[in-house]
Image: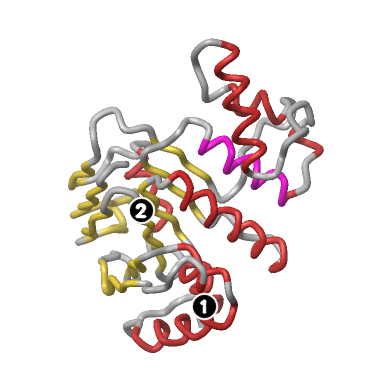
Amino acid sequence: MARLHVEIRDKRFPAAGGGARRVLAGVRFTLGPGERVALTGPSGCGKTTLLDIVAGLDRDFRGRIERPPGARIGYVFQEPRLLPWRTVADNLRLVLAGPRAEVEARIRRVLAEVGLAGEEETWAAHLSLGMARRAAIARALVVEPAVLLLDEPFVSLDEPTARRLRLLLLDLLERHRPTTLFVTHDLREAVMIAERLVVLSPPPARVVADLPIPLDPRARREEAPVERLRRELRRRLPEVPVPEETA
């Protein structure tokens, strides 16, 4: 398990007509080893940009990201980003190296964990959206990451499917205990999965709240305690515009 420290003092993107648009400013928080933190805030405040910086995909910023040297990172993007002309197993093989027998055993094990046992040779193009999102989670977990990043992994799913996948993700996180940072616009999702909620302001974004989510593992799986805590957190949130999903 890995400790993760995020400190972004300044992140800008080129603006139309020259100059630059400041997106992130004064974003600082730390995740303890194995901790699960949800990140929310108004649309366009730089949440995905922050994940890309943490992942090392965007290095053009002022600040620092601290994690143990060599810590493996798994990233579940908003879209599954599977190669449709490859099988499910092939998509996982692309992120693995090592002896073939070990690679194949790891692929079978993680696909079984996400409910895709027997789908190894299914073409990615033939998966339903829910199955594709399971495969994307499997691809992130198969590298046995110390740090797991998720960017609205259940967006665009119908609510029953999204709930099933949230419960699956919760089981996986409790079993593997990666240090987890995930973006969501849904407070119910945050309450179910995260141990803390970090809230960003409109851009240039800064941290305006860092709230604990004190639910035991059993309560996270029950709708009534999740809804009660969602309402309590909603009342405690600062007056920043948030998407309707968190209302």
Q: Which amino acid, by three-letter code, is at mark 2?
A: Ala
Q: How many marks?
A: 2
Lateral position of residue 40 relative to residue 133, left or right:
left
Residue to which mark 2 is pinned: 15
Q: Quadrant of the N terminus?
A: top left
Q: Residue at x 28, y 48 (%)?
A: 33
Say few, some or many: other residues with alpha carbon within 10 Å of mark 2 (under 14 / 14 to 19 / 20 or more): few
**Relative vertical location of residue 246 with respect to residue 8 in this rendering, above or below:** below
Q: Is residue 186 visible?
A: no
Lateral position of residue 27 relative to residue 194, left or right:
left
Q: Which amino acid, by three-letter code, is at mark 1?
A: Val
Colouring scheme applied when the structure was drawn: secondary structure
Residue 136 lies within the magenta run = yes
Which region is colored magenta? 130-141
Q: Residue at x 67, y 60 (%)?
A: 164
Gap between marks 2 and 1 measured at Cα? 41 Å
Q: Residue at x 40, y 69 (%)?
A: 41
Say few, some or many: other residues with alpha carbon within 10 Å of mark 1 (under 14 / 14 to 19 / 20 or more): many
Residue nearer the viewer, 195 or 235:
195
Q: Picture coordinates of residue 10 (x, y %)?
A: 21, 53
Q: Picture coordinates of residue 5 (x, y %)?
A: 22, 49
Q: Residue at x 31, y 73 (%)?
A: 211
**Relative vertical location of residue 12 with respect to residue 91 in this rendering, above or below:** below
Lateral position of residue 21 relative to residue 170, left or right:
left
Residue at disc 2, secondary structure: loop
Rendered image: mark on residue 226? 1
